[in-house]
Amino acid sequence: MELGGAIHSVQKNPDGWYTFDHIIAGKSKMKHTANQEFKILDHIFQGAGLEWNVHVRVLPNGNGSTITWTFIKPDGLSDEQFKEQLKSFDSEIDAWRKALERQQ
């Protein structure tokens, strides 16, 4: 699967992890922890020697929804490096959204 943005060559593995090439982190992997009832889509991202825990919540909003993302700065990143990593967030999330919509 190709997502564009910062992630390329995505493959889902039998252990539930997705492996892919990330334009900044190189060979990386991610695993989701989803709970449909409580609208949770947390995930762990591992790449470039770092592990990111990302907490995602989907909140009802009129006829649609609002998604909130909370990033915890991984040990090993300075504040400046953390800010730099988050700059590509919007394009990466947009690519994930489009890929998920194609799967429905």
Image (tube, rainbow, N blue to C red):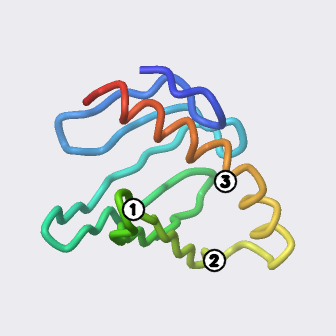
Horizontal side of 75 relative to 63 (left or right) equals: right
Q: Of callouts 3 and 1, which one flags the residue occurring earlier in the amino acid sequence?
A: 1
Percent from the top left, x then y, of residue 92? 61, 43
Q: For the view shown, which residue lies furthest in the front direction?
A: 62
Q: Residue at x 41, y 20 (%)?
A: 1
CB atoms at circles 3 and 2 under 8 Å apart?
A: no
Label disc, if present, on residue 89 of the rendered structure: 3
Going by the numbered disc 2, the residue's amino acid type is Lys
Closer mark to the observer between disc 3 and disc 2: 3
Q: Quadrant of residue 82?
A: bottom right
- The x and y percentages for residue 52 are 52, 66
Q: Is residue 13 left or right of residue 95?
A: left
What numbered label is drawn on residue 73? 2
The amino acid type found where label 1 is placed reads Ser
The mark lying in front, picked from 3 and 1, is 1
Quadrant for the C terminus, please: top left
Which of marks 2 and 3 precedes in the sequence? 2
What secondary structure is found at the residue carrying circle 1?
strand
Q: Residues within 10 Å of mark 1 (few under 14, many from 20)?
A: few
Of residues 93 and 24, the one nearer the viewer is 93
Label 1 belongs to which residue? 65
The answer to whether residue 37 is left or right of residue 23 is left
The picture places residue 90, in percent across and down from the top left corner, at 67, 51
Q: Nearer the viewer, residue 58 or 24?
A: 58
Q: Quadrant of residue 21?
A: top right
- Residue 12 drawn above or below residue 41: above
